[in-house]
Image (tube, rainbow, N blue to C red):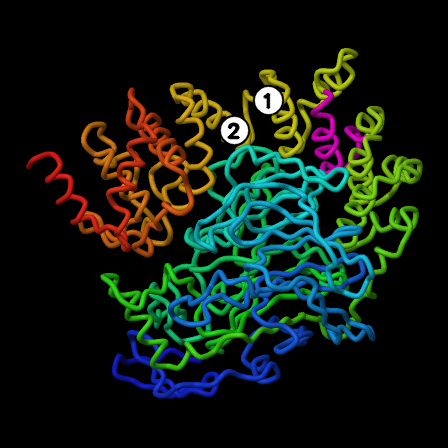
Amino acid sequence: MKPFTSVLALVLLTTGGALFAQKEEGWNPDTTFPPLSPAEAIKTIEIPKGYRLECIASEPMVEEPASFAFDGNGALYVCEWRTYMQDEFATKQLDPVSRVVKLVDTDGDGVMDKRTVFIDNVVLPRTVLPMHDRVLVNLTGSNSVWAYFDDNKDGVSDRRELAYEGSANGGNIEHQNSGMVWNLDNTICTNDHRFRYADGKLSDGKHSVGRISQWGLARDDDGRLFCTWAGGANPAHSFQLPAGYPILKLKEHAPGYEIPYAACKVWDQSSGGYKVDEQRVLKDFSACCGQTVLRSPLMPEFYGRVVTCEPVGRLIRMSTIDWKDGLGVADNAFPKSEFIRSTDAYFRPVWSETAPDGTLVFSDLYRGIIQEKAWFPTEGNNVEWVARYHRVKKWGMLKVFRHGRIYRMVPDGKQPGPQPRMLDETPAQLVPHLAHASGWWRDTAQMLLVSRADKSVIPALAAMAVSHADVNARIHAMWTLRGLDALPKETIIAATKHESARVRRAAVQLAEPLLGDKDGDIAKTLAAMLGDADAQVRTQIFLAYRAAGQNPPSELTAKPAPIILALLEKGKADAQLTVLSESGKQGKQIYETLCTTCHGPDGKGVLAGDKYLAPPLVKSEWFKRGGNTDILARILLKGQTGPIDGVAYGEGLMLPLEGTYSDDQLASVLNFIGQRWHSWKQPVAAAEIALARKETAERKTPWTHEELKALSRQKLGK
């Protein structure tokens, strides 16, 4: 549609059955509008030329599909959030009435036609990972992971076992654990854990630093994890190194990458505003989530690109990753537009996966409210947010919920691949799938081989690792052998000489645990590779020396690649943290997992568009040690809202942490910040937090900056 040329001009448009009047300040419907059927909704969704959308499941077969995963036979396990914002008050949101459903395509036409309730009556299941004989599930309110079993194969779970006993997690439902992927290195990764699987149990191994990925996690062919920030307005970040290595503060985006180009003119977000000259509604990304890396031979033109959902903008961003001198930079694959976007007000894509048949599959919550209660106040002093509530209430959007659609995008003129039958295959039959052109097939075959722990396939894997023509096959074969504890050192050394830089990089990563061996063969091999032409290989060698507690050779650091330079700078910064007390070290872990989202790893704040998400902690007056400990405790416990000294930050709200963290944990966070950036000598005690908790027990709302300043003056007798 062409932009209007005058502030007074009005253009009438029908979108989703509604009549809108275009004005410079935004779009306002003249009447309420009803939800559309899946067939009607597809007509409102823009996709690339040469492709089509097919609805493979919709209500009542599926409701509120928040996340999903395919099992080895192509069945779809869907987490249904049946209590998520069923009204503006989040009534009964934590009631145990959500579920995981299993959807099956019985006739091979790509459309799901059989449904069973696999798990019923649970609290908001967050993520699923179907394995060889069980399905791993994480539920809201806990970091524990449960293994569910369908013993009689009727599509309904018969029993469950505790696979990992984690701590309680009472934080906001959008900020808890998310994502569960089997990665190349045989770890099961979530946003803040790296589990090892053995004998039906998960052993915990957290990421080296908190990995922020608010809803979803994706991996590429080389084991890099792609994360998203919703509050940080970031569709793709922290993807430079494979999982298990440091997360670096680098410029990972091309100019203009952070600008979203929504097509729906319904202004139901608080940070919107219709940009007339650019034909876009959102100023910044608002709800980045549900990402995947497309790794399908059915659409080779998109192979390796990252797909990220944005339900507030009713769009899906596709990112290209340009690798140069070892550094990856993300850019919008569809400049000044988006990969997928809709004009339908209720289009809410939240999760995506590359399907076994090679298509892109994504879920659409298809609903009115897409903000959790903390960001959807019906009253209070946040004028913009309350105004949003009244807008969507007037437009009838509060009444649209308990819908749900799952779509697949199919290229015209191509036939999607066959359904897999991996759960029925022997280990010997699984091995050839490691050479499949689809990343999903390779990943799933490796997961099943390692989790079954059947060593009869070792000879076939060994042959594939040293002689197969396909690069991915060699890499997967080596990692599968490592997962079976059967990877010969000689195979690793041979792989370091392969013509493919990807194989050499994988070989170095596999060699890392052997670098200190007495015979010195691995050390000699890596020393001979210091001049490797590929920057990613050199970076991996640097990481190997660091992991072994050795100083990397000067050949790597004299003229370092950008990633190595960033690692050197991080090493200097880490060395400065020796001043931290034990409490401060504990607080560092919590800060890196929670606080860096808005305050940044350097405490200077995260810039999103033209606004910082949170104030810079390095300059905070409250951290001048003295009479302000009580103020800091109150902020952590109850949260803070509104501008600070006239400056507006992000969405204007810091969430309360009183129901999520203990007194000792909150004290440790303050000690990390105070010792790291304000030279604190005396740490805060947990008893000080406990006293503030007791004194503020009756308070129900976040503090404003004015209230805190008045309270500080009162306590200081001024």
Left of 710 or right of it: where is 200? right
Q: Quadrant of residue 389?
A: bottom left
Q: Position of residue 153 (x, y in %)?
A: 82, 62
* Residues packed near mark 1 inside 10 Å, few (<14), some (14 to 19) or many (20 plus): some
Image quadrant occupied by the N terminus: bottom left
Please say whether residue 601 is one of the residues in the magenta stretch. Answer: no
Q: Which residue is mark 1?
A: 546
**Residue under label 2:** 567
Asked if marks 2 and 1 touch (Cβ < 8 Å), the reply is: yes
Q: Is residue 218 left or right of residue 375?
A: right
Depth order, front residue of 39/263: 39
Kind of residue at badge 2:
Leu
Quarter of the rendering containing residue 421: bottom right
Q: Nearer the viewer, residue 222 or 165?
A: 165
Q: Which residues are magenta?
A: 495-514
Q: CA distance from mark 2 to mark 1?
A: 10 Å
Q: Which image quarter: residue 419? A: bottom right
